[in-house]
Image (tube, rainbow, N blue to C red):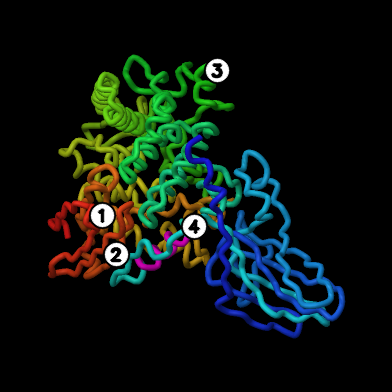
Amino acid sequence: MLFQNTQQKLIREYSEPIRQIKLDDHEFFFDFGNAMFGTVVLTLRAETDAAAAVGLGEKLAGENRIDREPPGCIRYARADVPVTAGTKDYRVALPEDQRNTTPPAVPLPEEFGVVLPFRYCELTLPEGVKLQSIRREAILYPFNDDAADFECDNDDLNAVWELCKHTIKATTFLGIYVDGDRERIAYEGDAYINQLSHYCLDSEYDLARATQEHLLFSPTWFTEWALHNHLIAWADYWYTGSTALLEAYYDELKKRTLSNLADENGLISTETGLVTEEFLRELRLTRPIKDIVDWPHAGFTENGVGERDGYEMTPFNTVVNAFYYNSLRIMSDIAAVLGKPAEAGDFRKRAGYVREQFQRAFFDASRGIYIDGIDSSHASLHANMFPLAFGLAERQHHESILKFIRSRGMACSVYGAQYLLEALYNTGQSDYAFELMTAGHDRGWLNMIRRGSTMTMEAWDLKYKKNLDWNHAWGTAPANIIIRYLVGCRPAAPGCRKMILAPQPSKYLHRFRAKVPTPHGTIEVQWKRGEELQYNAPAEIEMMVNTSTA
């Protein structure tokens, strides 16, 4: 294990409430401004032994009252605090949730006790006990709040940026990326979005590496999740310039291309009898591998629709094979970087063959769009946005594909939104991408803020996932999309030795300023419509500037 020391770096961060109200002689309400994972520390002066009561929660139920029975997996917990005579500090011990504190959940080191995501606190004090002070003790991985910044002339986009930035900071509390508080399990698809957003907010890379290491030895069971490993490893190389992770786990990454599932048509399927016990052992899986496309499916929603846009789950499906092609392409590049030209050539040849077969199997020329899979006539948002995001769609078909994509709206989850936005920016659709990031309807990030969350939610709303939690970093796509595409600042060479600066601000913006972290220091960018783009970069970085899209 190269990077599994991240939990040793976890810290305690203390903060005062931004608002406090004395409800009566014995009851108090506190608002800490945003949610973090932790508990509270009270300083109490007591005349005699007694007991105080503390309630912590994420959601309000009316003015200055915490929702004590919140829906879904939104959090609330109550704890009694034994108080002894005198003036003393009390770190509130919270009750355990068995689901997220026992395997397969990632454990928090015992020294930190039990933590809860919360913004609000209610305190009840008995007669003879006085409050001297209250602080929130948050547990997190070190995070540089000043490393990255973005501000523009659109208040909605600013609010979405702050929501996503805070989410990345707050959800580091376990020392690796996890899905959210309900499970506290690391998932590959979640981890990749978390990684991209974290890299755009802080020049910190060990957390992502530790997460990938964990996932290679404790993998999850979705087909596309295995294929996310290559995206994680390749992003690490491009941002850090280090081959350490690629060298250490090259053989593991090869296995996770899932090439053993390829049929004579070159495409892969989990439903043709090739998922054997030996295959599962090779991947360290203890349950069958399963295609996901997007999540949740209809059974987890109140409206019975789900987030797959009606996707037909055929044995050979478009989304899985788009990921398969992308993984082969990345493995070719990885092999070349590691000085394995023969293997690089083999992966490149296989990727080329899959690309050809992909077009034959999944593209409906009569409609100019992709269908969900072999033997399907249904076309979904997902079947079209993933090929576009991965460069599989032929340029002459972009117009018809984009027309179809626009007709579907945000018919995907907060996870799928990452790839939808990438597809749009990769094809010059910055106006529509901006509209989606600042949408006022209930399938957007502003709705999360409107509902009262200060972290990105697991799903767009309760009706789209009835057991959602309010602290899922897989919903932070705008953090990395804003930096990498709207500001347009992303690596052009491994280790950020060269950086692209190609803003796509859309017609809706007239100015923005940004700070972008790199291993060499911060890049500062200022853009104003009609004026020359201004930037300042460390001497170690060669800037490749393109203002044609600004």
Is 71 placed above or below 277 here?
below
Q: Quadrant of residue 254?
A: top left
Kindly identify the residue that appears in the image at 42 percent across and 35 percent down.
229
> Mark 4 — residue?
142
Which secondary structure type mostly characterizes the magenta part of the structure? helix
Within 10 Å of the Cα at label 2, are there few (<14), some (14-19), or many (20+) other Cα atoms? many
Which portion, as a residue range, is magenta?
A: 157-166
Q: Judging from the image, what secondary structure is the residue with disc 1 in?
A: strand
Furthest toward the right, the residue is 48
Whether residue 511 can be seen here: yes
Amino acid type shown at disc 4: Pro
Choose mark 2 or mark 4, whichever is in front: 4
Task: Give, as a three-letter code, the residue at label 1.
Answer: Cys
Q: Is residue 236 left or right of residue 354?
A: right
Q: Which amino acid, by three-letter code, is at mark 2?
A: Ala
Question: Label 3 neighbourhood size at 10 Å, few (<14), some (14-19), many (20+)?
Answer: few
Residue 277's label in the rendered image is: 3
Residue 458: give x, y in percent of width and height.
51, 52
Which numbered dot is residue 489?
A: 1
Mark toward the start of the polypeptide (3 vs 2): 3
Residue type, label 3: Glu
Q: Is residue 522 magenta?
A: no
Q: Residue at x 31, y 31 (%)?
A: 334
Q: Residue furthest bottom?
A: 25
